[in-house]
Amino acid sequence: MGPFKRFALRNQKKSTSTSASIDSASVLRKRRYGNNHLCPYCLSSIATWPKGAFLTDCDTCKRPIIRLQTSNKVRVLSLIDLTRFAMFPVTAFTLFAGFAHIITAKTFVIWVAWAIIIYGLTDFWNGTCGLESGMYKSRRRLSYGHVARRLSILNVVFGGMAIFVGCLGLFLS
């Protein structure tokens, strides 16, 4: 657990409102890291960002991250989490369209197969990053060492199986 997370947890336990701990954590982040951004996965500082690039990988956890700049704010997001988040409404729409008979059965099978392939690719990608870095995050818990490597191997295996099942669905349709 990094120093930022310990500080935020300590303040959250003392304070009754979570907005106070978030504000003090953002103040600490600015004070400690300056203009550097933090990786949303492992909370390590990203000191150098390639000039003109909006996509890079974290030096610590090897996960791909995106920098999105709005008019007055810069957000750093994990590309793997963003892909999973974007696939949720697509999958929900596919299931709704299939069960409501808006699309044909063959189209439904193709869309579901592509959704399974994309979920498998993100799992496989996350697992290979975990094997390379020795870090794995499940829900809000960050694991290190041999535990992270075992979880990453499972992610790679199940991601590969999902890719296989999705490709099988595409070839059989």
Image (spheres, rainbow, N blue to C red):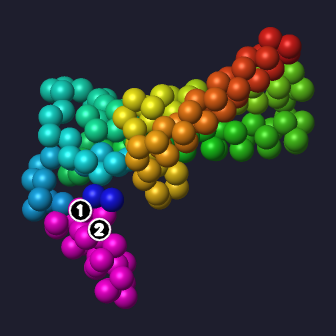
Q: Position of residue 128 (x, y in %)?
A: 48, 28
Which residue is depicted at the point 76% across and 30% down? 112
Q: Are marks 1 and 2 in contact (CB under 8 Å)?
A: yes
**Mark 1 Cα-neighbour bin, 10 Å: few <14, some 14–19, many ≥20:** few
Examine the image and state in which quarter residue 7 appears: bottom left
**Stretch in magenta:** 3-28
Q: Is the stretch drawn in magenta largely helix, strand or loop?
A: helix
Q: Is residue 92 magenta?
A: no
Residue furthest toward the top? 171
- Between 5 and 15, the one nearer to me in the picture: 5
Q: Tag on residue 6?
A: 2
Residue that mark 1 sits on: 3
Q: Position of residue 106 (x, y in %)?
A: 87, 21
Residue 143 placement, left or right of 44: right
Name the kind of residue labelled 1 in the image.
Pro
Residue 103 placement, left or right of 162: right
- Between 159 and 80, the one nearer to me in the picture: 159
